[in-house]
Amino acid sequence: MSEQFKAFWITETEPKKYSREVVERGIDDLPAGDLLVRVRYSSLNFKDALSSVGNKGVTRKFPHTPGIDAAGEVVSCADGRFQPGDQVLVTGHDLGMNTAGGFGQYIRVPSSWALPLPAGLTLAESMILGTAGLTAGLSVQALVGAGVVADAGDILVTGATGGVGSLAVAILAAAGYRVVASTGKQSEHDFLKSLGAAEVISREAVTENCERPMLSERWAGAVDCVGGTTLAAVLKATCAGGSVACCGLVGSPDLPINVFPFILRGVSLFGIDSAECDDQRRARVWTNLAGEWRPARLGELSREVGLDGLGAEIDKMLKGESHGRVLVNLDL
């Protein structure tokens, strides 16, 4: 009998009905891979919440352990890329989607999926950032690469209370940008200002008059976590030569837009894919997140739960009631 460990387990009890529980699994039950990691921390992301309710666009086969993020110590590495005891993090690829994920105390994955823990971050801090931080960092990297400098003007972040949005606000503020955060939650204005937002506006302020072909120039750049009508309105209000990073679809996957922002103002739209971005970009962003882009008061961006507390946090996220980051401590 192989060594046992705790894991968050999603089971399809009958067609389109799913149960959630904490179970014991054996290490020998994990999929094949070069790298075995003892997971200390993970984090809750929207993909994890979708997987937990049986979204087949995220996870095809059940039972399953979600968790697209994991950080911990190497137990063994068959190809010698890492040594036992090395601290590593894994984000993206297929972790937690169709490969047993970070909501279990052990994962086994290809060693190419892992990165050494960046200097300057603890395991817990790396998971407060996690995929959300990587996505936000890739978004900021896209704006910087397009020439959107800190004194260019206001940078808008939509869906700003979510995991990606809140970290985008904090990262941009740390990098010296003037950030305008958009949210539909009046109660979260103080939270967003504590992250570094210079101004907080409503969702309606972003989408006002969005049926018009173009809107007055307002944003030097933007990180959009919403999609749909919101993204269309952001593009129509982006200044000439400005750039928008698109990294979410909580509002809608559709984009009701004309070509005017692109051909009349030269606006650029960047799609952000954190799951399959190349290793060099991934490593570069993590270096920045541990250094000059490190959010102020990083530890205050999250609340910590064990596997037993995950169900309630998943329900909050699916209802749109979550804010900031949920840090999952696998040793609680």
Image: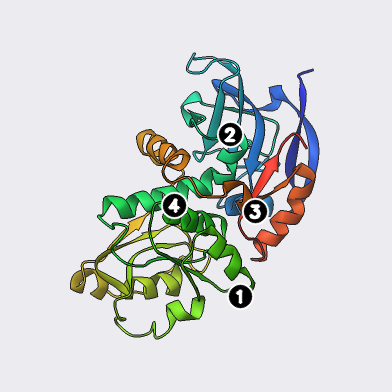
Residue at image point 57% right, 47% down: 298
Q: In this figure, which residue is indicated by the disc labeled 1?
A: 186
Q: As shown in the figure, which amino acid type bears the numbered disc 1?
A: Gln
Q: As shown in the figure, which amino acid type bears the numbered disc 2?
A: Thr
Between marks 2 and 3 in the image, the one whose residue lies nearer the viewer: 2
Q: In this figure, which residue is indicated by the disc labeled 2?
A: 122
- Whether residues under marks 2 and 3 lie with C-beta atoms below 8 angstroms apart, the answer is no
The answer, for residue 191, to whether it is visible in the render is yes
Nearest the camera: 226 or 153?
153
- Whether residues under marks 2 and 4 lie with C-beta atoms below 8 angstroms apart, the answer is no
Give the CA separation, mark 2 to mark 4: 19 Å
The answer, for residue 13, to whether it is visible in the render is no
Give the percent coordinates (x, y) of residue 157.
45, 64
Q: As shown in the figure, which amino acid type bears the numbered disc 3?
A: Ala
Q: In this figure, which residue is indicated by the disc labeled 4?
A: 174
The colour style of the image is: rainbow
Give the quadrant of the C terminus.
top right
Q: Circle 2 sits in a helix, a strand or a loop, which is it? A: loop
Q: Circle 3 sits in a helix, a strand or a loop, which is it? A: helix
Of the image marks 4 and 3, the number of the one nearer the N terminus: 3
Give the quadrant of the N terminus.
top right
Give the percent coordinates (x, y) of residue 189.
58, 70
Q: Circle 4 sits in a helix, a strand or a loop, which is it? A: helix
Of the image marks 1 and 2, the number of the one nearer the N terminus: 2
Q: Mark number for residue 49?
A: 3
Give the CA separation, mark 1 to mark 2: 33 Å
Of the image marks 3 and 1, the number of the one nearer the N terminus: 3
Give the percent coordinates (x, y) of residue 220.
31, 66
Q: As shown in the figure, which amino acid type bears the numbered disc 4?
A: Ala
In which quarter of the view is residue 292 placed?
A: top left
Give the CA separation, mark 3 to mark 1: 24 Å
